[in-house]
Image (cartoon, coloured by chain):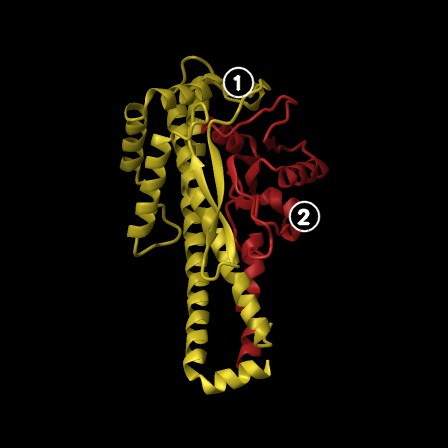
Chain colours: A yellow, B red
Amino acid sequence: MEDDDRCSSNNPGGIEQEEEDEDGTVLRFLDSLDSYLTLLDALSSTLRQGWFELASARHSMGSSCISSVLLDQKVRSAATTFQVGKSIDGSPSESHPSFAISKWASSRDGKCSFGEMEVSHVQKTSKNSELRHRGSSNFYDTTEEHDLRINASSTIGDGDVQKERSKSLSVFGTLVSPKLRAAQVSFETALDAIVEIANIRSSMLCAFTQLQQEMKEKGLG
Amino acid sequence: MAGRAQIPTKNSALIAMIADEDTVTGFLLAGVGNVDLRRKTNYLIVDSKTTVKAIEDAFKEFTSREDIAVVLISQYIASMIRFLVDSYNKPVPAILEIPSKDHPYDPAHDSVLSRVRYLFSAESVASGRR
């Protein structure tokens, strides 16, 4: 401690560097916090859309055709999974988990062409949005973009992805309402948001832990 | 917390869900449903008949499984087991509180935001000024 004091008093550049690092941590924390809240707003909008489409599908197909009773207990593996890795912000000792999604990955060979396209769209959107207004759904899709996404999902995706999608839908019958397909796309979009939220949450908690440590070292915490 | 705990890397990890029927149905449509050989699922559908004990048991089970990366829990359900959720502090699986149809998301009740809120509290600001 005394050595540190001597060093810092003899090395004002070191104090400035420390303060800069601390400011960087505070900024990282506040940015993560803002992104977390914005993403949760966007998730809320997407889920509302999905619930509405599910309700519409239930209205057209009948309540008994879309219910949890049909979610059979047949052994099956999840077609959409997550990968957990390590991400490092700042010093190597402050690593935190990072999450990635693999959507409709067939035969577990890591192919997720449509999924990757989805994630990169989300990432581009998050980087380009400079003015974010909480409480509105403009972070993700407008209605037109959502319709485009539904059309794209039925035409661009490769055969395996479409097969996995149809398998999911087949729980509710061979012929399903277009609204149910739309609900499927909405919940897929919600999963993209969830990956982002998980990563932002992880980054925020890492920055928070660093801030707590810095406050303790200064005798403030 | 994030720096000290071991962060396990996982491929093909699952999303677990503790939510109402519509939310679970929607996410199952998106392909996250998993039923293993012992007929154990990665979701719990909560309705008016579901007991708090069943929710607690599901939460404890999902947070201790090695093959789960994220646990989604509706915020109103998380409030029923708030003590358990707030005392959970492992980096993986990540616990995300999400809105439900009848209960919109409230940042005031989010366990992650509650944890970081004290940074902005009067006590921490006052101690910084001294």
Kindly identify which numbered label has been placed on residue B84: 2
- In the depicted structure, whether residue B118 falls above or below residue A16: above
Residue at the right extreme?
B53
Q: At 45% from the left edge and 58% from the top edge, which residue is drawn?
A: A89
- In the depicted structure, whether residue A170 falls above or below residue A134: above
Q: Quadrant of the N terminus of chain B?
A: bottom right
**Residue B24 locus on image (x, y percent):** 53, 31
Q: CA distance from mark 2 to mark 1?
A: 35 Å
**Residue A119, image quadrant:** top left
Q: Is residue B123 visible?
A: no
Mark 2 nearby-residue class (10 Å; few <14, some 14–19, many ≥20): few
Q: Amino acid at mark 1?
A: Ser
**Residue A56 locus on image (x, y percent):** 42, 26
- In the depicted structure, whether residue B87 falls above or below residue B37: below
**Residues at circles 2 and 1 in contact by the CB criterion of under 8 Å:** no
- In the depicted structure, whether residue A129 falls above or below residue A208: above
Q: Chain of mark 2?
A: B
Q: Quadrant of the C terminus of chain B?
A: bottom right
Q: Amino acid at mark 2?
A: Leu
**Residue B63 locus on image (x, y percent):** 63, 41
Mark 1 nearby-residue class (10 Å; few <14, some 14–19, many ≥20): few
> What is the secondary structure assignment of the residue under circle 1?
helix
**Residue A19, image quadrant:** bottom left
Q: At 61% from the left edge and 45% from the top edge, which residue is drawn?
A: B78
Q: Nearer the viewer, residue A70 or B68?
A: B68
Q: Which residue is mark 1?
A: A64
Q: From the image, state whether disc 2 or disc 1 is nearer to you.
A: 2
**Residue A188 locus on image (x, y percent):** 41, 33
Q: Is residue B11 visible?
A: yes
Q: At 43% from the left edge and 46% from the top edge, which residue is drawn?
A: A196
Q: At 50% from the left edge and 30% from the top edge, which residue is drawn?
A: B32
Q: Nearer the viewer, residue B34 or A41?
A: B34
